[in-house]
Image (cartoon, grey):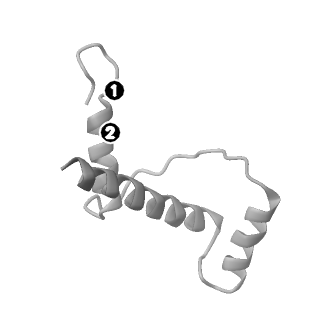
Amino acid sequence: MAAESGVPCFKSNIREILRMVKGMFVRPRLRLVTVKMPEIYLEGIDELIKIGRYKNRSEVIRVAIRELLRRELWIREAELS
């Protein structure tokens, strides 16, 4: 998926992300990412876990990012088509 210059192809990466978001990629490889966020966000995340909506912080954050990507990328993809 790299361009001839050795730089990753942005368009290919977007396609891969869309495949993952759409659920076509069954078992994505998980990578550790460190993120700083306001305490109020963590309190909200912890409340979602406490009420049983999610199992852990990672799951909450993955779902939130997946929904953001779905909304932002699919809308743009539809607009460009």
Establish if 55 lies above or below 15.
below
Nearer-the-camera pick, 40 or 33: 40
* Image mark count: 2
The residue under label 2 is which amino acid type?
Asn
Establish if 8 lies above or below 45.
above
Task: Mark 1: give few (<14), some (14-19) or many (20+) Cα within 10 Å.
Answer: few
Residue found at the far right of this picture = 39
Q: CA distance from mark 2 to mark 1?
A: 8 Å
Q: Which mark is residue 48?
A: none
Residues tagged 2 and 1 counted as in contact (Cβ below 8 A)? yes
**Residue at screen point 53% across, 64% down:** 64
**Residue at screen point 56% across, 67% down:** 59
First along the sequence among labels 2 and 1: 1
Please provide percent x and percent y for residue 53: 60, 82
The residue to which callout 2 is attached is: 13
Please provide percent x and percent y for residue 57: 65, 65
Please provide percent x and percent y for residue 1: 25, 31
Judged left or right of residue 45, residue 74 is left
The residue to which callout 1 is attached is: 8
Residue found at the far left of this picture = 81
**Residue at screen point 59% across, 68% down:** 60
**Residue at screen point 67% across, 78% down:** 48
Quadrant of residue 12 within the rendered picture: top left
Establish if 24 lies above or below 15.
below
In terms of secondary structure, where does tag 2 sit? helix
Task: Mark 2: give few (<14), some (14-19) or many (20+) Cα within 10 Å.
Answer: few
The residue under label 1 is which amino acid type?
Pro
Residue found at the far front of this picture = 79
Residue found at the far bottom of this picture = 51
Judged left or right of residue 46, residue 3 is left
Please provide percent x and percent y for residue 35: 67, 47
In terms of secondary structure, where does tag 1 sit? loop
